[in-house]
């Protein structure tokens, strides 16, 4: 996000706090409860949004150098993503060309040769079949025709994107649109440092998991003892970028920072910015960290999903962490602002832990209960308020992609 836009967002948040207003979708809408429970709908969603749609599988720092790799098993096939010796990103089906064994089961690592654990055929990170063990016994095989099967992929603006279909097309510029691409490029993901990952496996529909990121109306109630200490409830700026959007929430630090000269304002600490990328990605910027959340449905259970979360230190935090300490919990002092009474000790890892733990133990637990009551089939619809425009947008996007009409407006009698 550019500096001028950051200042505009902060001013809008200050205005909202002072006038007790927030973003406004202009109407209340009705979302059918079946959206979260209908198995036939879930299968259409799987085909349309996952099997046939490009997928963000990580950010560039997750493949930090030649030979680094990561795996993904959430898209109906095992995927092995690599960076070759020239730094090029690839995504392959994680399957040996001999008899389909998976080359690795590790979630990530660094290897300059992949040796199949079954009979030890070897592959380079660019997919080439390098060696057939006891080739003279096995018989003649044209190695050049037995590279790993490669999926369409692209790396741009720090995103690693894969298409699950062999004949699919990945066009990151088209997925983001010019405005959002420029805004995200400004965050310089490629200069961030990967810090760690976690997964949350819960009994809730993937869209319920996604909805939890779509409003902060609940911060002061559901998160009264946790996130509410870090951020204001209720006030939020909202902006759409085609099928994607951005929500910015005011952090508590904004209350202190607003008294300082504008030249000293620090957006990273005064606001939590959450970008949504269609269909299943949330990208949250909090306290100098970037948190990437990818939410996947369980194709066999409409009431189950898994959220994969990886987090990164932004460049200015990265410098403070230092090379040796990057993967450990490190305290970075005075990151809020130099030379003001607002100096605060900021624990980088603790902020991410708080965010992830709050999502797991508060948001998703609440949503698991909603899933159970939704499945009972006695409530026809959910209501999305005027102050929840992102929820309108998620669901109208999904519906449009499936050829369904927009959400119906609720009208009080
Ligand atoms: S299946 Fe990989 S070497 Fe046999
Ligand atoms: Fe929440």
Image (cartoon, rainbow, N blue to C red):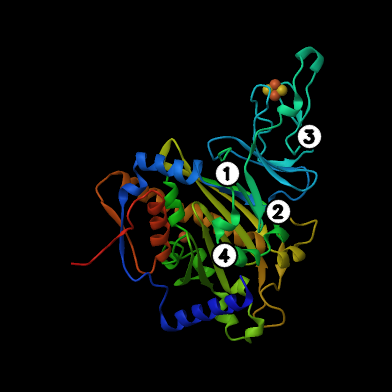
Quarter that holds the N terminus: bottom right
Disc 4 marks which residue?
A: 180
| Quarter occupied by residue 166 | top right
Q: Which mark is residue 163?
A: 1
Report x, y in % for residue 390.
43, 63
Q: Nearer the viewer, mark 3 or mark 1?
A: 1
Residue under the image location 40 percent in, 48 percent down? 368
Q: Nearer the viewer, mark 3 or mark 4?
A: 4
Report x, y in % for residue 196.
66, 51
Mark 3–mark 1 distance (CA, rounded to whole Å)? 24 Å
Identify the element where label 4 is drawn: helix
Give the class, few, some or many, for how many residues have Cα within 10 Å of label 4's Cα (few <14, many ≥20): many
Give the class, few, some or many, for how many residues have Cα within 10 Å of label 2's Cα (few <14, many ≥20): some
Q: Nearer the viewer, mark 2 or mark 1?
A: 1
Mark 3–mark 2 distance (CA, rounded to whole Å)? 21 Å
Nearer to me, 180 or 62: 180
Q: Are marks 2 and 1 in contact (CB under 8 Å)?
A: no
Instruction: Identify the mark nearer the N-term, 2 or 1.
Output: 2
Instruction: Identify the mark nearer the N-term, 3 or 4.
Output: 3
Q: Are marks 3 and 2 in contact (CB under 8 Å)?
A: no
Mark 1–mark 4 distance (CA, rounded to whole Å)? 20 Å
Q: From this viewpoint, which residue is outermost toward the top?
A: 137
Q: Quadrant of ligand 1?
A: top right
Give the class, few, some or many, for how many residues have Cα within 10 Å of label 1's Cα (few <14, many ≥20): many
Mark 3–mark 4 distance (CA, rounded to whole Å)? 37 Å
The answer to whether residue 203 of the structure is visible from this angle is no
Report x, y in % for residue 89.
70, 46
Q: Is residue 374 left or right of residue 141?
A: left
Q: Which mark is residue 61?
A: 2
Disc 3 marks which residue?
A: 113
């Amino acid at each position: 996000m550019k500096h001028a836009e950051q200042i505009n967002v902060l001013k809008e948040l200050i205005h909202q706090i002072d006038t007790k207003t927030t973003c406004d979708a202009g109407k209340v809408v009705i979302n059918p409860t079946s959206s979260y429970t209908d198995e036939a709908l879930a299968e259409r969603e799987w085909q349309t949004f996952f099997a046939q749609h490009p997928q963000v599988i990580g950010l560039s720092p997750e493949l930090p150098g030649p030979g680094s790799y990561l795996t993904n098993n959430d898209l109906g096939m095992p995927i092995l993503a690599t960076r070759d010796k020239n730094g090029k990103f690839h995504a392959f089906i994680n399957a040996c060309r001999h008899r389909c064994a998976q080359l690795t089961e590790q979630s990530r690592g660094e290897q300059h040769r992949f040796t199949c654990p079954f009979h030890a055929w070897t592959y380079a990170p660019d997919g080439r079949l390098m060696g057939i063990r006891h080739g003279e016994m096995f018989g003649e095989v044209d190695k050049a025709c037995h590279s790993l099967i490669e999926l369409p992929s692209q790396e741009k603006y720090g995103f690693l994107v894969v298409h699950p279909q062999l004949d699919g097309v990945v066009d990151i510029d088209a997925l983001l649109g010019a405005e959002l691409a420029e805004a995200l490029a400004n965050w310089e993901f490629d200069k961030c440092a990967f810090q760690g990952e976690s997964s949350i496996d819960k009994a809730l529909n993937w869209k319920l998991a996604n909805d939890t990121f779509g409003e902060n109306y609940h911060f002061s109630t559901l998160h009264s003892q946790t996130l509410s200490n870090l951020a204001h409830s209720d006030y939020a700026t909202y902006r759409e970028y085609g099928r994607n959007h951005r929500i910015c929430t005011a952090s508590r630090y904004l209350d202190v920072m607003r008294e300082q000269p504008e030249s000293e304002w620090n957006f990273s600490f005064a606001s939590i910015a959450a970008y949504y990328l269609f269909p299943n990605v949330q990208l949250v910027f909090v306290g100098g960290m970037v948190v990437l959340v990818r939410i996947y449905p369980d194709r066999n259970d409409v009431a189950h999903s898994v959220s994969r979360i990886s987090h990164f230190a932004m460049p200015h935090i990265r410098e403070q962490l230092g090379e040796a300490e990057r993967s450990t919990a490190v305290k970075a002092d005075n990151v809020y602002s130099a030379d003001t009474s607002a100096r605060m000790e900021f624990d980088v890892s603790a902020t991410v832990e708080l965010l992830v733990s709050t999502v797991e133990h508060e948001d998703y637990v609440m949503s698991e209960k909603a899933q159970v009551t939704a499945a009972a089939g006695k409530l026809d619809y959910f209501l999305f308020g005027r102050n929840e425009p992102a929820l309108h947008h998620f669901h109208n996007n999904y519906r449009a992609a499936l050829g369904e009409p927009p959400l119906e407006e609720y009208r009080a009698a």
